[in-house]
Amino acid sequence: MGTVLMYIKKTICALAIFAVLGIPQAVTFSVPFALASIFSKSSTAGQGLSLGVLNLAIVIPQMLVSVIGGPFDALFGGGNIPAFIAGAVAAAESGIVALTILQSPPPDASAAETPVVGFH
């Protein structure tokens, strides 16, 4: 009986943690699409193409990690540390690229003037 109660307590704790962490995760998933739709409003390509490109930019690296993650870990003896280091280097590089190449929005672009459209 004690094992069942401990299992129930652990399950409730796990669900509570995921419920609390789900709120910022939902923001993390929604904000990039909302920003892309806001800043692509004046673009000649349109919001649909911009959101499609953003979606591909998210999905393609996930697929690459799924395909090469296992062999990459096996190459370095089965540990995850090299993969985490490669991910950290890639994140730092993409941050530098984003800060140096991407244009800043014009100062007169107000969020109140543009509709926020997102999905998830």
Image: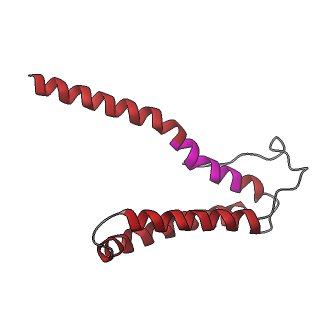
Q: Is residue 27 magenta?
A: yes
Q: Residue at x 52, y 36 (%)?
A: 23
Residue 111 position by quadrant: top right
Residue 36 placement, left or right of 6: right
Residue 65 position by quadrant: bottom left
Q: Where in the figure is residue 43, as x and y percent of width and height?
A: 80, 64
Q: Where in the figure is residue 116, as x and y percent of width and height?
A: 71, 46
Residue 114 placement, left or right of 72: right
Q: Where in the figure is residue 119, as x and y percent of width and height?
A: 58, 49
Screen quadrant of the N terminus = top left
Q: Main secondary structure of the magenta part?
A: helix
- Name the residue nearer the viewer: 11 or 91: 91
Q: Where in the figure is residue 15, as x and y percent of width and height?
A: 35, 33
Residue 77 placement, left or right of 118: left
Q: Residue at x 46, y 32 (%)?
A: 20
- Outermost residue to the right: 108
**How many marks overall?**
0
- Look at the picture and state if 108 lies above or below 17: below
- Name the residue nearer the viewer: 41 or 103: 103
Q: Which residues are magenta?
A: 25-36
Residue 52 in view, yes or no: no
Q: Is residue 33 magenta?
A: yes
Q: Residue at x 41, y 67 (%)?
A: 83
Residue 41 in view, yes or no: yes
Residue 8 placement, left or right of 15: left
